[in-house]
Image (cartoon, grey):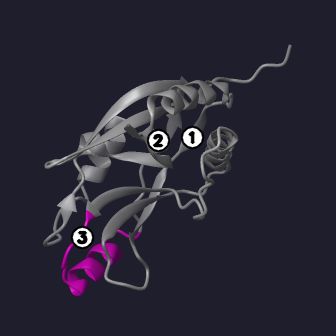
Amino acid sequence: MQRLFVAIDLPEPVKEQLAGICCGLPSARWVKPEQLHLTLRFIGEVDGALFREIREALTGINLPPFAMRLKGVGCFPPRKAPRVLWVGIEANDPLGHLRNRIEAALVHLGLEPEHRKFAPHITIARLQETPLTRLTNFLAGNALFTTDAWAVEEFHLYESTLSAKGAIHTIEASYPLTIITTA
């Protein structure tokens, strides 16, 4: 069985900008820069045959590259003790189109549809007993956080292997976004 998800990687300059705010919260477990990504769809565990079908189905997604920018910070869940600290994505219709095409391809293969609303974000830390006043100060101090825009030119199918030191993410396939031409 393979544990899979589909994601967009962040370019190094964006990871460096994120590193500038990833500090100053007690008990926060910061995500390592090489693990930062934007999950488009968590798939979960699949067998080898379904893995091959998923890998093939995603090749049929033909959309043009688009620009993306990170903007703002927040935490989940909204009305309970915060467990996840995230950076948001500036409103982006092409990102939504890509996510919807991926979802449609996976549902067509028989995977259960994702019932949660797509809330694009980059998880930057896991929180455990972080003092609320410190978290509130962090959120207020970084409310205007934004990165430079970059071109999203591909997305990836990842395998996530759980280990005692955390998840290890391995790219299983990459899918370029290409300019759609009409003949």
| Number of marks present in the image shown | 3
Q: Amino acid at mark 2?
A: Ala
Residue 83 locus on image (x, y percent): 30, 72
Instruction: Please name which of the two marks, 1 or 2, marks the residue nearer to the observer.
Output: 2
Labels 1 and 3: the sequence-earlier one = 1
Question: What span is in magenta?
Answer: 126-143
Which of 158 and 108 lies nearest the eye of the viewer? 108
Q: What residue is at 51 percent from the left and 56 percent from the top?
A: 120
Report the disc number at residue 127.
3
Q: Is residue 94 left or right of residue 24?
A: right
Where residue 15 appears, as percent x and y from the top left, is 31, 44
Would you say 129 lies left or right of 136 here? left
Q: Quadrant of residue 146?
A: bottom left
Q: Which residue is rendered at x = 53% and y = 45% of the image?
A: 68
Q: Which residue is mark 1?
A: 67
Image quarter in which the C terminus is found: top right
**Vertical placement of 149 versus 65: above or below?**
below
- In the image shown, does 68 or 131 lie closer to the viewer? 131
Dot 2 or dot 3: first in sequence order is 2
Q: Give the distance between the C-alpha atoms of the residues marked 2 and 3, in whole angstroms.
A: 22 Å
In this view, the residue in front, 14 or 158, is 158
- For the residues bearing labels 1 and 3, Cβ distance under 8 angstroms: no
178 w.r.t. 26: above or below: above
What residue sits right under mark 2 in the picture? 7
> Which amino acid type corresponds to the residue marked 1 in the rendered image?
Ala
